């Protein structure tokens, strides 16, 4: 009977400790100034960006082992490096196009104070109306099929 009573007392004392720790965490959360409340409670723009990025990265990372098993380790690493270089080059080209479009528009005295430049605007401004339509069609198709997956 004595070991059972000791076990009950240990459980009750550990429950009291966790209850006190929970109260201390609630007091720390109520301050609202901590990094924890900024990162973990959501609702911010940064939170949504991190969520989207982690979802995209997670989808790719989950398929990597299967891809590597199909093509082999060496060719998998070579293709990953190639895709990384290709993605970096594409991001570089897109950023240059954005800078070129913005500099042209600023010469025309356009204000970007309350305006975010969209990709189809860059295509229209630098390449013409046809490429704007192609860009919009691609984005809409990608969003439609991306939301289904």
Image (cartoon, rainbow, N blue to C red):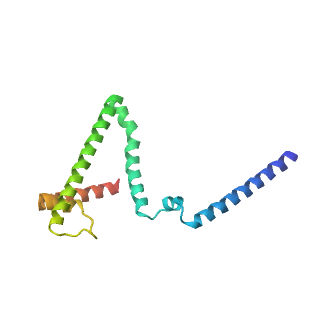
Q: How many marks?
A: 0
Q: Is 35 situated left or right of 22 in this image? A: left
Q: Name the residue nearer the viewer: 82 or 114.
A: 114
Q: Which residue is depicted at the point 41% across and 60% down?
A: 46
Q: Which residue is depicted at the point 43% across and 59% down?
A: 47
Q: Position of residue 73 (x, y in %)?
A: 36, 30
Q: Is 32 situated left or right of 136 in this image? A: right
Classify 70 as above or below 144: above
Q: Position of residue 99 (x, y in %)?
A: 21, 57
Q: Name the residue nearer the viewer: 109 or 123.
A: 109
Residue extending farthest right: 1
Is residue 133 visible in this depiction of the protein?
no
Q: Position of residue 2 (x, y in %)?
A: 87, 47
Q: Position of residue 8 (x, y in %)?
A: 80, 52
Q: Is 29 situated left or right of 46 in this image? A: right
Is residue 39 visible in this depiction of the protein?
yes
Classify 20 as above or below 65: below
Q: Is 118 situated left or right of 67 in this image? A: left
Q: Which residue is depicted at the point 24% across and 47% down?
A: 90
Q: Name the residue nearer the viewer: 65 or 42.
A: 42
């Amino acid at each position: 009977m004595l070991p059972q009573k000791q076990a009950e007392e240990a459980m009750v004392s550990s429950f009291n400790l966790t209850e006190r720790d929970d109260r201390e965490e609630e007091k720390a959360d109520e301050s609202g100034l901590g990094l924890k409340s900024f990162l973990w409670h959501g609702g911010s723009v940064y939170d949504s960006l991190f969520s989207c990025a982690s979802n995209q990265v997670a989808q790719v990372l989950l398929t990597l082992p299967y891809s590597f098993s199909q093509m082999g380790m060496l060719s998998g690493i070579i293709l990953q490096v190639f895709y990384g270089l290709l993605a970096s080059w594409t991001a570089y080209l897109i950023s240059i196009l954005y800078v070129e479009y913005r500099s042209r528009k600023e010469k025309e005295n356009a204000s970007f104070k309350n305006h975010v430049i969209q990709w189809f605007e860059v295509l229209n401004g630098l390449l013409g109306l046809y490429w704007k339509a192609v860009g919009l069609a691609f984005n809409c198709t990608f969003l439609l099929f991306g939301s289904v997956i």
